[in-house]
Amino acid sequence: MRKILVLLMFLAATARAQNLALTPIISGLDSPLGIVSAGDTRLFIVLQHGQIVIYDGTKILPQPFLDVTSLVSCCAERGLLGLAFHPHYRDNGFFYINYTDRNGDTVVARYSVSADPNRADANSGRPLLNVTQPFANHNGGNLAFGPDGYLYIGLGDGGSGGDPGNRAQNLTTLLGKMLRIDVDSGSPYAIPPSNPFAHDTGARPEIWAYGLRNPWRYSFDRVTGDLWIADVGQGAFEEIDFQPATSIGGENYGWRRMEGTHCFNPSTNCSDASLTLPIFDYSHSEGCSVSGGYRYRGTRYPLLQGVYLFGDYCSGSIWGTTRASNGAFTTRKLLTETIDISTFGEDVAGELYVADITRGIIYAISETTQTQSPGPRRRAARH
């Protein structure tokens, strides 16, 4: 009897953990694409047209932290796309942005905070990396520092459809790759000596992993150091890739040979042992443009502990992925709402947020025991 009771309690806890609630905390934003912490109680909101604004816990401050609107081409899949604060931001005041310039090309630049902690020094911009974009779409744009202190830069395959230049599989170009650079050494940066292609004359040394179509948001688990990557699909499947903290890099995530776990080009006999397949993919019957999130490491909602949350821009659905002690992954749909999901965010305490780009709303994510059952919806892909 006791075993049955324990089993029922476990099943009830699992069911409760699968329900989410979204509480709006910020509204009136102009196309939010990023929600980033600088290691304190503030949230920095990236706006696609070229501004970063600060939410102080009660309101958006009247003056933007940074305004680079004059430098940015926007919109569709262009704009101010990424923000990351240096791991030692409190000491050095450095932060990094990723945007498409007036020619539509990718720029990764370093800026500094001013004497006012709520204002950046707009004249401190120092470009670190410039990448020519052959088409307007698939620019990637995310930035994140790993637990190793290196900056990871996600770049799409250069755009158009079907990766016509096969750039994601070409190691001589940065497009379709995850890059890893050392911003604390060299000028303007150094190559980490442990990068998988650091000593390969036939590859770009910045490359950490490849075979990506358009990595739209990736994050490091703040507890384990594992890397979770959401990669937007072509016309049929969206995928979540997983890279353990023990990785030495060099993974080939498959694009354009594969879209998710399915052959793309070639249409048959596409997979072999050289590829790292996604841990989860879903078809366009359930959405059409994945937005990566975070593994929950907050304290407010114990039933969500260790669940990786991600969503879909087109359907407004949010999924949760858990990993068992044997390494197996389980993914379930937790919520579907009428929101256009552009990004997730994590605050200093590990609590999570999600943005609706169209309505300009940031929601706090919480666990609830109440059933969420709004019907699914469909719209055109964005990324």
Image (cartoon, rainbow, N blue to C red):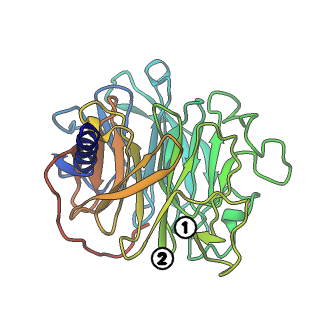
The Cα–Cα distance between marks 1 and 2, rounded to whole angstroms, is: 9 Å
SS category of the residue bearing label 1: loop
The residue shown at (56%, 75%) is 160
Whether residue 20 sits left or right of residue 183 in the image: it is left
Q: Which of marks 1 and 2 is nearer the N terminus?
A: 2
Q: Where is residue 232 in the image (x, y as percent from the top left)?
A: 48, 64
Circle 1/circle 2 CB separation < 8 Å: yes
Q: Position of residue 255 (x, y in %)?
A: 62, 66
Q: Residue furthest top?
A: 91
Q: Which residue lies furthest to the front in this view?
A: 1
Quickly name the residue at label 2. 236
Q: Badge 2: few (under 14), some or many (20 or more) residues near its Cα, within 10 Å?
A: some
Quarter of the image where one finds residue 283: bottom left
Please state which amino acid type lies under the numbered disc 2.
Ala
Quadrant (top left/top right/bottom left/bottom right) for the C terminus: bottom left
Whether residue 281 sits left or right of residue 250 in the image: it is left
Look at the picture and state if 47 lies above or below 295: below
Look at the picture and state if 195 lies above or below 33: above
Look at the picture and state if 263 lies above or below 30: below
Q: Badge 1: few (under 14), some or many (20 or more) residues near its Cα, within 10 Å?
A: many
Q: Which residue occupies the foreground of this view, 68 or 168?
A: 168
Q: Position of residue 357 (x, y in %)?
A: 29, 58
Quadrant (top left/top right/bottom left/bottom right) for the N terminus: top left
Q: Can residue 54 be seen in this view?
A: no
Please state which amino acid type lies under the numbered disc 1.
Gly
Q: Which residue occupies the foreground of this view, 77 or 7?
A: 7
Quickly name the residue at label 1. 260
Look at the picture and state if 140 lies above or below 163: above
How many numbered marks are there? Answer: 2
SS category of the residue bearing label 2: loop
Q: In the drawing, what numbered circle is on residue 143?
A: none
Q: Position of residue 195 (x, y in %)?
A: 73, 40
